[in-house]
Amino acid sequence: MITQHLPVRPQVAEMSPAAGVLVPRQMATTAPGPVADLLTVGRWCQAGRPSSRGGGRRLECAMTDRSVTIYEVLPPREGCPGRESWRRDAIARLRFEDESGSWSLHWPSGRQFRRDPEIAETTDVRVLLSVVDSEPCAA
């Protein structure tokens, strides 16, 4: 069973019994395609990136009805100012575009996310996950 660390409000998400991943209630009842994609992203986060497996690092994802934000979570480090507690850094956001039925990739830029103009929208969320996985600056 997959266990996710998803900071999603209970009234917004519900558990998918098959995968143990929280998905937004609106999507669980109205959009079977995106739900399957959300489960794919949840499993990908649970598996972790090879570069994020060492030193207690892990991946988490937070889901809304139209997006998934992927975070790298770093453990506390003694002797490092500002690292006395767990640190959670956003590394990417995948957004579902209702009109096209596809996903787009966005990178963090300050307090916002900006769409990657070089990566085309796709209906296969695994394509975007492979881009995130291969991006050295996303870890």
Image (cartoon, helix red, strand yellow):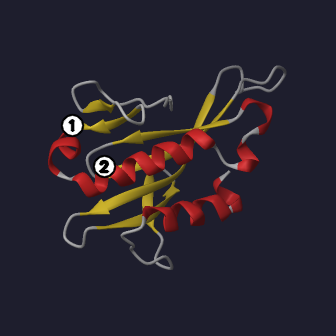
Quarter residue 55 falls in: top right
Q: Position of residue 78 (x, y in %)?
A: 82, 20
Judged left or right of residue 50, residue 58 is left
Q: Position of residue 97 (x, y in %)?
A: 27, 65
Label 2: element kind: helix
Task: Determine the residue positioned at 48% across, 31% down.
Answer: 4
| Residue 133's disc number | none
| Residue 35's disc number | 2
Upstream in sequence: badge 1 or badge 2: 1
Task: Determine the residue positioned at 70% across, 35% down.
Answer: 57
Q: How many marks?
A: 2
Quarter residue 114 falls in: bottom left
Judged left or right of residue 81, residue 105 is left
Task: Determine the residue positioned at 38% across, 35% down.
Answer: 18
Give the camera-side residue of 31 and 64. Answer: 31
The residue pinned by badge 1 equals 25
Note whether residue 133 is visible: yes
Q: Position of residue 108 (x, y in %)?
A: 51, 55
